[in-house]
Amino acid sequence: MLSRLSRFLTPRTISSFAPPVSHKDFIPSMAEIAIFASGCFWGTEHIFLKHFPPKPEPGKGIISTAVGYTGGKAEITNPNYKQVCSGSTNHAEAVRIEFDPSVVGYADLVEFFYRTHDPTTVNRQGGDVGTQYRSAIFTTTPEQATIAQRVTEEVQAKHFTPKGTKIVTEILAAGPWWNAEDYHQLYLFKNPGGYQCPTHRLHW
């Protein structure tokens, strides 16, 4: 975690951020937004795109992704990586997924989210510790909230109750979204040998 932080503490201007809103002008009208936090956002984005690649068309449901910061203190806007890693903003590292629900359902994405990290550790994934690494689902519609709760209960009963462990994932309504700095976007595709949290793998 410290090596990641020291390597990438570079200044960022406001202009390097996308607005904290959906980019609906640039995606098909039927697209929906899903937001997940499961530790280091490099690995979260990487594993979703590996298993739901956008191309060749129509792909497997994901249209585009962005990594960024969400779920933090309301008074802190435009947080940068250094601020988020300090834990002072309470933002989570997360991935924002634009997806086509006619190709992949939201429930499938939620189940895959649980399948690819450890949702039983509070503010931690592997060796990465801090509120920015918490497990969380940020829902963008009331229907998503219902689905996320249902899938959570199903996954708990099938995969964690038999092991005597409990899911601690937060399920919250999505708030403002801030894109992370450009060098974070698609990081592990650009840097295949880069750091990846060992929990970001298929657990079943």
Image (tube, grey):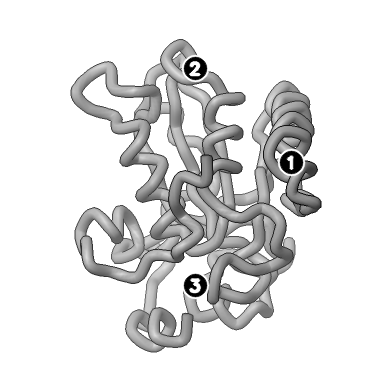
User: What mark, if any, has residue 101 been given in the picture?
Assistant: 2
How crowded pointer 3 is (Cα within 10 Å; few <14, some 14-19, many 20+) is rated as many
How crowded pointer 1 is (Cα within 10 Å; few <14, some 14-19, many 20+) is rated as some
- Residue 131, quarter of picture: bottom right
Task: Write the residue at 32% across / 62% down.
Answer: 182
**Mark 1, residue position:** 173
User: What mark, if any, has residue 18 been given in the picture?
Assistant: none
Q: Earlier in the sequence, mark 1 or mark 3?
A: 3
**Mark 3, residue position:** 80
Q: Are marks 3 and 2 in contact (CB under 8 Å)?
A: no
Name the residue nearer the viewer: 31 or 157: 157
- Secondary structure at badge 3 equals loop
Name the residue nearer the viewer: 42 or 63: 42
- Secondary structure at badge 1 equals strand
Instruction: State the image coordinates of residue 91 (x, y, percent, origin top left).
Output: 64, 64
Question: What's the residue type where badge 3 is placed?
Answer: Asn
Name the residue nearer the viewer: 12 or 64: 64
State left or right for residue 82 relative to residue 114: left
Instruction: State the image coordinates of residue 185 (x, y, percent, origin top left).
Output: 33, 56
Task: Write the residue at 53% across / 31% down.
Answer: 109
Question: What's the residue type where badge 1 is placed?
Answer: Ala
Frontmost of labels 1 and 3 is: 1
Q: Earlier in the sequence, mark 2 or mark 1?
A: 2
Instruction: State the image coordinates of residue 190 (x, y, percent, origin top left).
Output: 20, 59
Question: What's the residue type where badge 2 is placed?
Answer: Pro
Task: Write the residue at 38% across / 65% down.
Answer: 196
Q: Are marks 1 and 3 in contact (CB under 8 Å)?
A: no
State left or right for residue 22 relative to residue 123: left
Task: Write the residue at 45% across / 65% down.
Answer: 197
- Residue 103 vs 65, above or below: the answer is above
